[in-house]
Image (cartoon, helix red, strand yellow):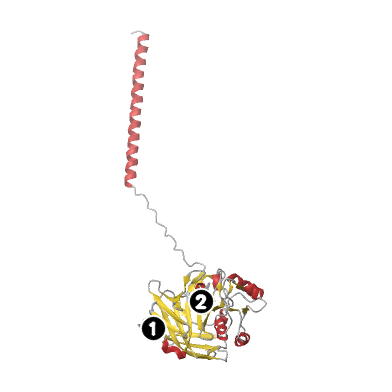
Amino acid sequence: MDTRKKRIIIGVVAAVVVCILIGGTAIYLHAQQKNDKEQDTVVAETTPVPTATPVPTPTVDPHLGQVRSSITGEWVEKKTEAKRPYAVMINNIEYAFDHQKGTSKADILYEALAEGGITRMLAVYQDPSNVKVIGSVRSARHYYVQFAKEWNAIYCHFGQTKYATAKIEEIKVNNLSGLSAIGPVVYKRDTSIKAPHNVYTSGKKLQKGAKRLKYSLKQNKKKAAKHFAFYEEDTDPDVKRQAKSVVLPFSNYSTCRLKYNAEKKKYYKYEYGKKHMDTFYKKQLAFKNVIIQFVEESNIDHNGYQTMELTNNSGKGYYMTNGKIQKITWKRKEAGNKMVYRDRTGKLLTINPGKTYIAVYPKSRRSLITIK
């Protein structure tokens, strides 16, 4: 065999060997890749995936930055609780009754006889800054001065008796009188309503007047009486006697009626045979708590002005809430401005959070009250 043929044969053999080697390598690599994939699959199937531990969502305090009101027991902003209250004399003869404004915004509402069988009211506002209209505003009476003092409130009135003036001076009550130089700043007449039943104010005007006279606008709790305590939540008293309807005939002229609404869990007020309405905010007056405070009441002079024996005195009464009624007592000392209500066991009266109506009612007419 010549040299040329040998070279051809050797080249062919070498090519075949190379092809075999390349093919084998490819087959090996393919098998290896397949094996790796199978191993990955096995690992994926057999290795558990770690489960993330859920992080609990922190509970947000719905009353963050708030405190309990010392007047209503409800949650309020800290800045609200720090404010000094205002106590406004409200006209309540029938004509004025039909034009009352801003009364539904009061936190505490007193009602007592003034003279001639008519009643007047004292509306206590912890923070009246957003109350657009309040009134109509009428003249001061000395026992209303005492009620205002109990809350360390700035007393607001348009006119006064000599007895009221003397009491203001005696027990040092900051006041905004409509007949003083501050009057035009605080009060304004509504000419669409007959005088003298047409004097109105607003929360902003009250605050403006108090600032002008440089009264302290911050509440000093040491100067306010501790009338009662509050339940933390709405609570039914542990008493059996029901009070779904109460009739309080202050006189032949003025009779207050309170009807319990079980759905709203409030007492709705009526007078002169009508719903007692705030005609500006278009709301009927309604209260979570009702206190009836029996007092010795009489004429103080020939004008028929009334007096209530509150100074260093005590007496009995009723407390109503959630359709139930219980007997209570009260005691008041002028020195130190101490006024307290106690329950039937003698403990400090605990009431439900919310607005309170206080009827300062003649002890001599107690038998005329109807409770159903």
Lower sequence index among marks 2 and 1: 2
In the displayed structure image, the side of residue 131 where residue 48 appears, left or right? left
**Residue 353 in sight from this viewpoint:** no
Residue at horizontal 36%, vertical 22%?
A: 18
- Mark 2 crowd level (few <14, some 14–19, many ≥20, 10 Å Cα): many
Residue 23 drawn above or below residue 185: above
Please name whichever residue, 251 or 236, is drawn nearer the observer in this view of the structure: 251
SS label for mark 2:
helix
Q: Residue furthest top?
A: 2
Q: At label 1, which amino acid type do we have?
A: Ile
Q: Residues within 10 Å of mark 1 (few under 14, many from 20)?
A: some
Rendered position, 2 above or below 257: above
Give the x, y percent position of residue 139.
59, 81
Q: Which residue is mark 1?
A: 371
Which residue type carries mark 2?
Answer: Phe
According to the picture, the residue beneath numbered tag 2 turns out to be 97
Cβ–Cβ under 8 Å for marks 2 and 1: no
Which one is closest to the eye, mark 2 or mark 1? 2
